[in-house]
Image (spheres, grey):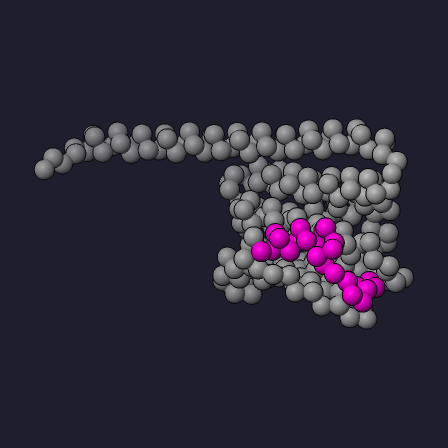
Amino acid sequence: MTIASAPDMDDHTKQLEQALREKEAALKELQHRAKNSLQLVISLLKLQSGRIRDPDARTAYDLTLQRIEALAIAYRHLHESGTETKVEFGRYLTELVTTTSANLPGGAQGTDIDVQSEKITGGLSLAVPLGLIVNELLSNALRHAFPAKSWIRISLTNPQPEVLELVVSDNGRALPTGFDPDADAGMLLAEALAAQLGSVLAVEATGSGTSVKMSVPL
């Protein structure tokens, strides 16, 4: 049996460290290009916004832009994190909510939107679907007929070590009787993303508003 000498082991360690640095640099460059590409797509879409006259087409355009911006924000926060692998969900959701509400016609229309999050971090595989789910639920909530003093609350907690809990609630008009989430494209997308994370959306509608909860296994 041949035992590697100390110099051989040092060389092998250096080679592994060099390979790791190269992979990290390649990952950083890939994420940087993805971020820039998404920003370019957003800019191109915004150039076309003035040409849209049909109300249905305008709604579809606005929703598409919001979804792409949700992705772009996630990549930017990943790039700015310094780790290249983790996103701080509280900061991400706060910026996402601000952008989504500003992009909707009329903005938040005086609605008080509050984001509460524990200090939780995770990778893109969790951040992206989580952000898109919040985007869809927030967009739906902002299209409700709100009372004079309206609010939306978004809460992200870690009640157990292996569980992430998201709650989006509002005091807007409850969902209409017979509301079919399978007929709403935004809710369909949110439910599909929840399923991707191994969860389901639990919707509770009352006379005082609507609450949507989701528990994600980590």
Q: Residue at x 36, y 29 (%)?
A: 18
Q: Decide if residue 67 is in sight here.
A: yes
Quarter assignment of residue 36: top right
Res 76 quadrant in image: top right
Q: How far across and how far down the image is residue 26, in percent?
A: 47, 30
Q: Is residue 144 above or below residue 22?
A: below
- Residue 210 lies in what quarter of the image? bottom right
**Percent position of residue 32, x then y:** 57, 31
Give the residue at x 80% y 54%: 142
Give the left or right position of residue 61, taking residue 91 as reference.
Answer: right
Which residue extends farthest bottom?
207
41, 22: nearer the viewer: 41
**Looking at the picture, does residue 28 appear above or below residue 56?**
above
Is 197 inside the magenta-drawn segment? Answer: no
Q: Position of residue 14 (x, y in %)?
A: 31, 31
In the image, residue 137 sits, relative to residue 205, either above or below, namely above
174 part of magenta stretch:
yes
Vertical placement of 112 versus 92: above or below?
below
Residue 148: % across, % down: 90, 61
User: The magenta stretch spans which residues?
Assistant: 170-195
Tag count in the figure?
Answer: 0
Please state, as top left, top right, bottom left or bottom right, where the N terminus lies in the image: top left
